[in-house]
Image (tube, rainbow, N blue to C red):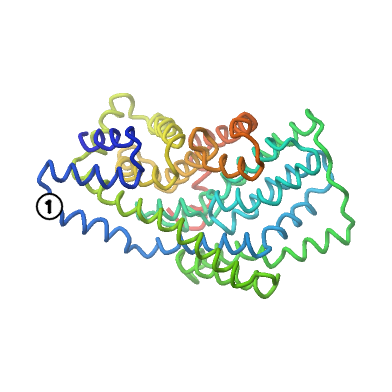
Amino acid sequence: MTLLLILIALLCLGVPVAWALGLASFLYMAWNGIPFTSLVTQTSSSLTNSILIAVPLYILAGEIMNNGGVTRRIIAFCSAIVGRIRGSLAQVNILASIVFSGMSGSAYADAAGLGTVLIKAMREQGYKPEYAAAVTAASSTIGPIIPPSIAMIVYGSLTGTSIGGLFLGGVVPGLLMGGAMMALAAWLAYRHEHPRQEAMSWEERGRAILDAVPSLLMPLIVIGGILSGVFTPTEAAAVAVIYASILAVIYHGGFDGGQFLSAIKATIRRSAGVMLVISFAAIFGWLAIRERIPFQIAAMIMEISDDPLVFLLLVNLLLLVLGMFLETIAVLLLVVPILFPMLGTFGISPVHFGVVVCLNLMIGLVTPPLGICLYIVSNIARVPLMAVVVAVLPFMVPLIAVLLLVTVFPAVVTFLPTLVGFR
């Protein structure tokens, strides 16, 4: 457990996660006389997995869509579908996250892209800015659950689990998250008398729906291509970038070279941070398994109970706490190499476990003090962070409820993958 204690000490001292992982591994190897050639070998080999190429590609696709007019058309489409019910813009916000999640794979892209447009629109219609920000932040958690998902790609690359199986496993939980939040938003709308949206004529609705059809085809192309075997998850990410570029440049127009360069820069910044954590986490995970840390933790859990449900509930508790303080990819790379070897002991499906882990970490994105999506929407809405935290609390109820449902009933996750032939 010395390796874990060194890491915890470094994190408590405020060392960034990536450097804490690398430094803890370096110190442990120096203390135990482990050749440093392993440090180079493990960190470099961790980045050779072709699946990881999909991460920057999906980030780039999201950036292009946000800057190329795709987001605005998705919002118009959702407005046409929801109609004039009370609190309809909150419903549009959540429904747009469900639709947009099938394109970007990133909660950050959803919160930033949809938030820029919808928070302003909700404020203009009379919603409290903190509520508009809270709805945007909470609904953005759907993004990495409904496929495609950057978090699931990282999990799959770490564990060898089928990306297609993980993507299918996230569909039902993601829809349940959206449905539960829409139900809560409807109840809050009638309780607080939220405004109604201006009525759209049938002609306007038809135009909005038709205008969004090319954008709505992207999830079908990406997921359909993966499931049919036409292309791999990595190739699907490249297809997403090409298709998003065609929409932004040719179909919608107005997407110039400056915007594309801005999207490239944003992608490089975010991808570099992710890859740095992945490389240092690889050597840490290798050392953890070498020192049998997963099996020591499994033995400790087995002393409490050998029930798989108890194990999953303990994992939920651990991940919810870690998600409050660490970024999603960092937690994945810290925890998954340690916990994944235990699944065989408890007879838990890797696909089920992957979706449970990702759902936990999405809740962490709207949980203080880190809660990155809270900071994004707080900045967009220009309201104090604590005001957004208070406003988002009611939305934690449906999120936790869906998490428990998915944890207790694995079939919610495994039904679709099993039906298609994934295990």
User: Up-down: is 391 above or below 65?
Assistant: above
In this view, 21 is above or below 395: below
> Label 1, on which residue?
35
Residue 131 is situated, as x and y percent measured from the top left of the image, at 69, 36
Q: In screen coordinates, is 421 left or right of 80?
A: left
Which residue shows up at 49% across the image and 47% down it? 414
Residue 15 against residue 67 in the figure, above or below: above
Q: Viewer-proximal residue, 275 or 341?
A: 275
**Which one is in front, 23 or 199?**
23
Between residue 273 and residue 158, name the one nearer to us: 273
Extreme-bottom residue of the structure = 250
Q: Residues within 10 Å of mark 1 (few under 14, many from 20)?
A: few
Identify the residue at horizontal 79%, vertical 44% (top origin): 124
Q: Quadrant of residue 253?
A: bottom right
Q: Position of residue 35 (x, y in %)?
A: 12, 52
Residue nearer the viewer, 166 or 332: 332
**Circle 1 SS class:** loop
Residue 105 visible in the picture? yes
Q: Position of residue 126 (x, y in %)?
A: 80, 38
